[in-house]
Image (cartoon, rainbow, N blue to C red):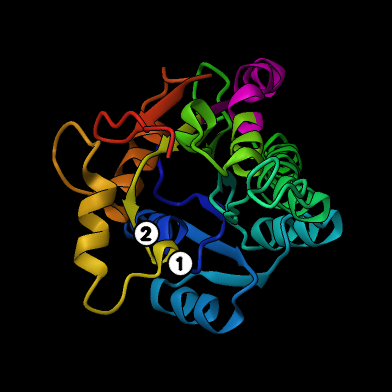
Amino acid sequence: MELNGAAAIISGGASGLGEATARDLAAQGVTVVIADLNEERGKAIADEIGGVFVRCDVSDEQQVQAAVDVAVATGKPLRVVVNSAGIGWASRTVGRDGSPHDLASYRRVIDVNLIGTFNLMRIGAAAVARTEPVDADGQRGVVINTASVAALEGQTGQVAYSASKGGIVGMTVPAARDLAAIGVRVNTICPGIIDTPIYGFSGGDAEAFKAKLVAPVVFPKRMGTAAEFAHLVRSLIENDYVNAEVIRFDGGIRFQPK
């Protein structure tokens, strides 16, 4: 699918994987709408790339609808929806002190990561459906969701996070089948250990911590980069025959229990 002249909405576009994707797509001539909670950073990035920022909590239906409306109002056909907003959480199902996992925090992770992804996918795809097809196949656009290898091989303490990301993986195929009728493809990326601000690297122990994280990576023996993730997103958009796929992006890593 041709990117130049299209519009895209990217949740979590103010940092990490979403920011890299926003910059990459903008460089291809895409008008990018960054939907994020970080107004200061989001506005700064949008200004740099000639895009638009809208403050958005992806778990809130009205805010997601408003963000999609902004994307439609750019005057460019909305062709791309990228879900990269998400939060992490670490807690055992039953803690070492015998206490059960906090239910409120579990619900919050599900609300943001899973329901938030579904919110933007469904509302964004409905807007894409109102555009004209771009080719003889009837294609109108693409949805790229971000899950995690934790969806497939969750570690100790990742029950909430893995459940949320596993839900994203699980809805990939049925969503692709649902949206085929309107010419929208759906693919999901499962990143492994990627060098983004989510890990909070700082201080003298940062390199030692990174070395521990990359130990299970097969090759190349390093963390992935946000730019590599963005390149994969663009490849999945541009390659019209990739649909209903869950793609590992992890250097061959296989997680240990903890």
Q: Tell me where residue 183 appears, x and y as whole percent.
A: 62, 23
Q: Tell me where residue 6 appears, x and y as whole percent.
A: 50, 49
Report the front residue among 177 and 17: 17
Q: Is residue 95 left or right of residue 102?
A: left
Label for residue 20? 2
Dot 2 surroundings within 10 Å: few (below 14), some, or many (20 or more)? many
Q: Tell me where residue 78 appears, x and y as whole percent.
A: 60, 47
Label 1 vs label 2, nearer the camera:
1
Report the front residue among 243 and 28: 243
Dot 1 surroundings within 10 Å: few (below 14), some, or many (20 or more)? many
Q: Tell me where residue 42 appears, x and y as whole percent.
A: 53, 75
**Is 45 part of what is drawn in magenta?**
no
| SS state under label 2 | helix
| SS state under label 1 | loop
Amino acid found under the numbered disc labelled 1: Ser
Relative to residue 125, is residue 16 depicted above or below?
Answer: below
> What's drawn in magenta, residue-wise?
167-187
For the residues marked 1 and 2, what is the alpha-carbon distance in whole angstroms? 8 Å
Residue receiving disc 1: 15
Amino acid found under the numbered disc labelled 2: Ala
Indicate which disc, 1 or 2, sits on the residue closer to the N terminus: 1
Most common SS among magenta residues: helix
Q: Is residue 175 left or right of residue 157?
A: right
Report the front residue among 217 and 66: 217
Give the total number of marks visible in the rendering.
Answer: 2
Relative to residue 165, is residue 229 depicted above or below?
Answer: below
